[in-house]
Image (cartoon, rainbow, N blue to C red):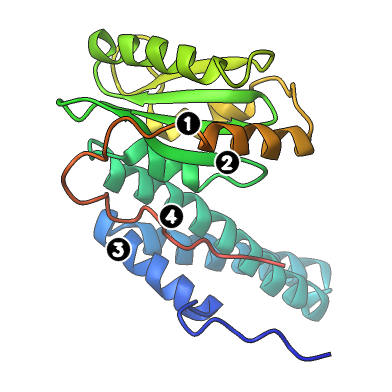
Amino acid sequence: MAKKPEDPERPGRIKQLRMIAQIIKEANPKGMPIVYASALGTLVLCIVIGLVTGWFWYLLLIGIMLALTVGLVVFGQIAQKSQYSMLHGQVGAAAAILQGMRGNWEVTPAVAVNRDQDIVHRVVGYPGIVLVSEGPGSRVQKMLVAEKKRVQRVALDVPVYDIQSGDGEGQIPIAKLQRHLMKLPRNLKKPAVYEINNRLKALPQTLPMPKGPLPRGAKMPRPKMR
């Protein structure tokens, strides 16, 4: 069998890690020292235990593997927090967070936009249809109601949830947005997710995307660990 050609535009894992490290340095100068300290501290602890118990070489090997694992975990957590801090307050921040979700989630950004650049994004997943807004609650509530009526025309029996993202009262901060969606009940199976998403794509796009650049880091690569 012929090998699948590699995408020349897709960066390798080492390059991805360097790109993410650079983002962390810009958002949080103390981030990378914390990563190094956590990995080194784990290794030193294992070495000390090895010297005390007499299992130095065994615990040295274990310590190296644990240090790498701890370093990658801390690296991922700090990278995620750095992404949130860079996206905070920017137009389209919720869409960037939603598009970074893992799993069977179909995200359609900006299905509704008003003159004030308030936005409603649509997500289709196992819970059903989730409408996520960006903007003050006093303005986006009408947009959510209108969009909910619109999607129910082609998905009558599908649960529809509406979520307001933001820092206002009753809104979900973008740092907690993914976790909030993951807690929703699983009402659909995988084939139904694709079927409903295809039906919703047939709906006309009534409003264009707001003017202005999308937030940096919207497609920030994630480190993968086997």
Image: 97 above or below 39? above
The residue shown at (46%, 67%) is 36
Nearest to N terminus: mark 4 or mark 2: 4
Question: Between marks 3 and 4, how big is the CA–CA gap?
Answer: 10 Å
71 or 144: nearer the eye? 144
Label 3 Cα neighbours within 10 Å, binned few <14 / some 14-19 / many ≥20: some
The residue shown at (60%, 84%) is 6
Residue at label 2?
106
Q: What element carries label 3?
A: helix
Q: Which mark is residue 79?
A: 4
The residue shown at (61%, 59%) is 70
Question: Between marks 4 and 1, how big is the CA–CA gap?
Answer: 36 Å
Q: Residue 203 carries which label?
A: 1
Residue at label 3?
25
Task: Tell me the amino acid under the disc marked 2.
Answer: Glu
Nearest to N terminus: mark 1 or mark 3: 3
Place of residue 108 in the rendered image (x, y in percent of width and height, measured from the top left): 46, 39
Nearest to N terminus: mark 2 or mark 3: 3
